[in-house]
Image (cartoon, helix red, strand yellow):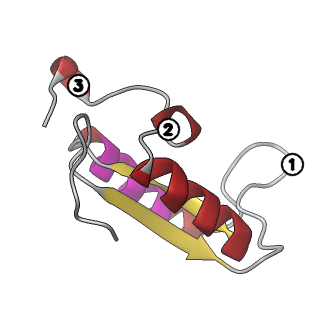
Amino acid sequence: MMPNSTNIYYGLFLEIKAPGVRLKKRDGTWANDHIAEQAAVLDALQEAGYIAQFAVGLHECIELVESYLTGNTPLLMPSPPPHGETF
């Protein structure tokens, strides 16, 4: 978790997974109930104005944190928080 706000988001939450962990099945559903629950929490955080997503492996974690800190948010979240709010 990075509670530092940017001009657009309140902070960054990453649900970190080990390399090789499969998040979704071939049919597009979550791999298991636990991951589905984590995805629901990430969705709620996004609705609240945070960037929140899964990160698989160290390389992806580093890339996402660097992206957040440099303001390259298109790598992280497709759209800003509701109502066009800025922080």
Q: Based on the displayed image, in which of its 4 quarters is residue 75 positioned?
A: top right
Compared with 27, 14 (above or below) is below
What mark, if any, has residue 26 been given in the picture?
A: 1
Q: Residue at x 63, y 58 (%)?
A: 63
The vertical placement of 21 against 55, above or below, is: below
Residue with the mark numbered 2:
72
Task: State how far apart marks 3 and 1 are (Cα).
Answer: 31 Å
**Left or right position of 37 against 9:** right
Mark 1, other Cα within 10 Å: few <14 / some 14–19 / many ≥20: few
> Which residues make up the magenta segment?
38-46
Label 1 or label 2, whichever lies nearer to me, is 2
Q: Nearer the viewer, residue 72 or 20?
A: 72
Q: Is residue 34 visible?
A: no
Q: Nearer the viewer, mark 3 or mark 1?
A: 3
Residues under numbered marks 1 and 2 in contact, where contact means CB atoms less than 8 Å apart: no
Residue sitting nearer the eye, 39 or 64: 64
Along the polypeptide, which appears first: circle 2 or circle 3?
A: 2
The type of residue carrying mark 2 is: Asn
Residue 13: x and y, percent? 38, 62
Determine the main secondary structure of the stretch shown in magenta: helix
Point 34% across, 71% down: residue: 1
In magenta stretch: residue 41: yes
Per the image, label 3 sits on a secondary structure element best described as helix
Residue situated in front as seen by the camera: 83 or 64? 64
Give me the disc on residue 82: 3
Dot 1 amino acid type: Arg
In the image, 13: left or right of 35? Answer: left
Q: Quick check: 80 above or below 34? A: above
